[in-house]
Amino acid sequence: MSELFIVVGLKAKTGKEDELRRDLSVLVEPSRAEEGNIRYDLFEDQDEPGRFVFVEAWASVEARNKHHEHGPHIQHFHGNGAINVDHHEFAHMLKRVV
């Protein structure tokens, strides 16, 4: 079992930056509490409010998949908060080199 590192970039719809910030912020603590979570941090671009980046680390691909596919807080976001996302800028699944 190897660790999985993920960075995800989201851009808010114009005028929906505060709503998306709120909706994304409430995902952090429940995600950190999930089995297999190592890191789950939310950042916002200092120069462009409304551009958000998640930095995640999971003990395994399976732990991340369980989070993403079955976490009730994630499912709630997909059903409600995702409406404020203009687009996904990137999603990179990374493996540690060194």
Image (spheres, grey):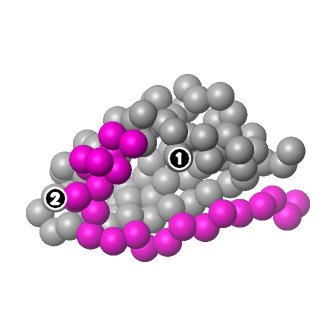
Q: Position of residue 70 (x, y in %)?
A: 51, 39
| Image quadrant in which you'd find residue 33 | top right
For the question of whether residue 89 can be seen, the reply is: yes
Specify the amino acid type for callout 2: Lys
Task: Give left or right: position of 30 versus 2.
Answer: left
Tell me which residue sits at (47%, 29%) in the image: 30
* Above or below: residue 5 compared with residue 87: above
For the question of whether residue 47 can be seen, the reply is: no
Tell me which residue sits at (65%, 28%) in the image: 35
Q: Position of residue 90 (x, y in %)?
A: 49, 72
Decide whether residue 84 is among the magenta residues.
Answer: yes
Q: Position of residue 52 (x, y in %)?
A: 38, 59
Specify the amino acid type for callout 1: His
| Image quadrant in which you'd find residue 86 | bottom left
* Badge 2 element: loop
- Between marks 2 and 1 in the image, the one whose residue lies nearer the viewer: 1
Q: Position of residue 16 (x, y in %)?
A: 16, 58
Mark 2 = which residue?
16
Q: Nearer the viewer, residue 83 or 7?
A: 83
Tell me which residue sits at (72%, 49%) in the image: 61
* Above or below: residue 39 compared with residue 81: above
Task: Give left or right: position of 91 versus 29.
Answer: right
Tell me which residue sits at (16%, 69%) in the image: 14
Residues drawn in magenta: 75-98
Decide whether residue 69 is among the magenta residues.
Answer: no
> Which badge, 2 or 1, comes first in the chain's sequence?
2
Number of numbered discs on residues: 2
Q: Which residue extends farthest left?
A: 15
Q: Are marks 2 and 1 in contact (CB under 8 Å)?
A: no
Label drawn at residue 68 = 1
